[in-house]
């Protein structure tokens, strides 16, 4: 069965690939682990300056990871302007700032939705510190995940918790710098197992809608029950103008946070296909959605730097495949109700080997044609230097 791919090396393919950039997470360059044990991996970054340096090296060899997300207080420094200079001197910038609202003892029963106003105020002060870091570093995104929820029936009042959360979020939006965005992440369980306050994309969309144009939904690929049709969720969020960004990872059960593309690359490809299709069908002059592609994975067994390069390269490959879908032929098949041909057109792009095209794209920009091969040299260096 033939599909048309004459456009695969056309200028629009290259231009779209140029626009696709990913953000690496500072925490992903340290040793990961489980609730049972954390084993230090060779070359793992030990402090924020090493994490920024590793993120800069990822960008140097891939050409598509120009920013690094930070997590506070894990990445706290006395002078955030100095952190900004340190990153920019290495060719990258500080991206999203992620507040940690789940490791203080007083947050055991919640943070922004806690029944005690004093605890909510403490949480808002922690967020304000993150907003101050945004101002100093030039960040435009506050990425918020809450562990808030309950474990037992009767533990708290659902409606009152929702009201408290909305009040806190409105105050956070008012803190944001001009042009800043709040991305709301959702998770259906853990560490709260009876209910979570932002359990799914519906609640995140509801809240983002109430908070106005500065708020959007952040989709973590691991935060869904098994069998969830994530590409469909993406399509709906795009249609509502509320898809703010992603935390990209891979999973087998739930929030496994494994290397991007390692277990179900077809699902991520289908997610990218929905985005590519949506952008291609925008009316002339329409502004494309601002989507922050951020990696969020833990590296319990792999050397973190190598795993991060793997993640960036795999995501870029899958996005490149999505650009190859013959949209004209697919539209014809859909209109004719030709289900077999429609599916084969989508599958054909997925099974296309884009590695030679990407190697050529990288070489034309002075980048290593095989980033992972180049990454091993840096890995040997940091393993020897850091132990």
Image (cartoon, rainbow, N blue to C red):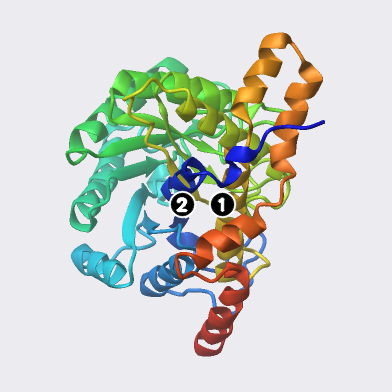
Q: How far across and how far down the image is residue 111, in percent?
A: 38, 38
Q: Earlier in the sequence, mark 1 or mark 2?
A: 2
Is 189 in front, or is 297?
297
> Is 83 situated above or below 195?
below
Q: Which quadrant does the C terminus fall into?
A: bottom right
Q: Is residue 294 left or right of residue 249?
A: left
> Is 133 situated above or below 300?
above
Disc 1: which residue: 316
Farthest residue, direction top: 336
Q: Can the viewer see residue 155 in this picture?
A: no
Q: Identify the element where label 1 is drawn.
A: helix
Q: Identify the element where label 2 is drawn.
A: loop
Picture disc at residue 22 = 2
Which residue sits at x=54%, y=23%?
Answer: 235
> Is 71 situated above or below 239?
below
Q: Which quadrant does the N terminus fall into?
A: top right
Which residue sits at x=57%, y=54%?
Answer: 297
Q: How far across and how far down the image is residue 343, in percent?
A: 75, 26
Do residues under tags 1 and 2 come within 8 Å of each other at their CB atoms?
A: yes
Q: CA distance from mark 1 to mark 2?
A: 9 Å
């Amino acid at each position: 069965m033939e599909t048309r791919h004459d456009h695969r090396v056309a200028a629009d393919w290259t231009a779209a690939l140029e626009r696709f950039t990913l953000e690496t997470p500072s925490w992903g360059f340290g040793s990961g682990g489980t609730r049972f044990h954390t084993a230090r991996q060779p070359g793992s970054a030990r402090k924020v300056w090493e994490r920024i340096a590793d993120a800069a090296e990822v960008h140097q060899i891939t050409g598509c990871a120009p920013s690094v997300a930070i997590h506070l207080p894990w990445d706290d420094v006395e002078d955030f302007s100095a952190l900004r200079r340190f990153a920019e001197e290495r060719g990258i910038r500080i991206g999203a700032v992620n507040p940690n609202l789940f490791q203080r003892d007083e947050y055991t029963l919640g943070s922004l939705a806690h029944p005690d106003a004093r605890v909510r105020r403490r949480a808002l002060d922690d967020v304000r510190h993150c907003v101050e870091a945004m101002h100093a570093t030039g960040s435009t995104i506050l990425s918020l995940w809450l562990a808030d929820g309950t474990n037992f029936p009767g533990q708290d009042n659902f409606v009152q918790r929702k009201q408290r959360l909305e009040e806190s979020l409105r105050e956070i939006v008012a803190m944001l710098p001009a042009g800043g965005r709040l991305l709301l992440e959702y998770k259906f369980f853990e560490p709260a197992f009876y209910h979570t306050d932002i359990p799914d994309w519906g609640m995140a969309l509801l809240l983002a809608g109430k908070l106005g144009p500065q708020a959007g939904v952040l989709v973590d690929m691991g935060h869904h029950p098994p069998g969830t049709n994530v590409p469909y969720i993406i399509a709906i969020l795009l249609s509502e103008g509320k898809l703010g960004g992603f935390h990209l990872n891979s999973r087998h059960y739930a929030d496994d946070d494994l290397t991007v593309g390692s277990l179900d690359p077809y699902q991520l490809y289908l997610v990218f296909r929905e985005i590519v299709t949506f952008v291609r069908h925008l009316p002339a002059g329409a502004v494309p959605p601002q989507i922050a592609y951020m990696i969020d994975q833990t590296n319990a067994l792999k050397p973190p730097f190598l795993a991060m390069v793997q993640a960036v390269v795999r995501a870029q490959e899958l996005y490149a495949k999505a650009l190859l879908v013959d949209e004209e032929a697919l539209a014809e098949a859909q209109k004719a109700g030709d289900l077999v041909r429609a599916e084969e057109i989508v599958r054909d792009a997925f099974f296309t080997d884009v590695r030679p095209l990407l190697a050529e794209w990288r070489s034309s920009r002075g980048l290593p044609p095989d980033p992972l091969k180049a990454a091993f040299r840096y890995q040997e260096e940091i393993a020897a230097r850091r132990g």
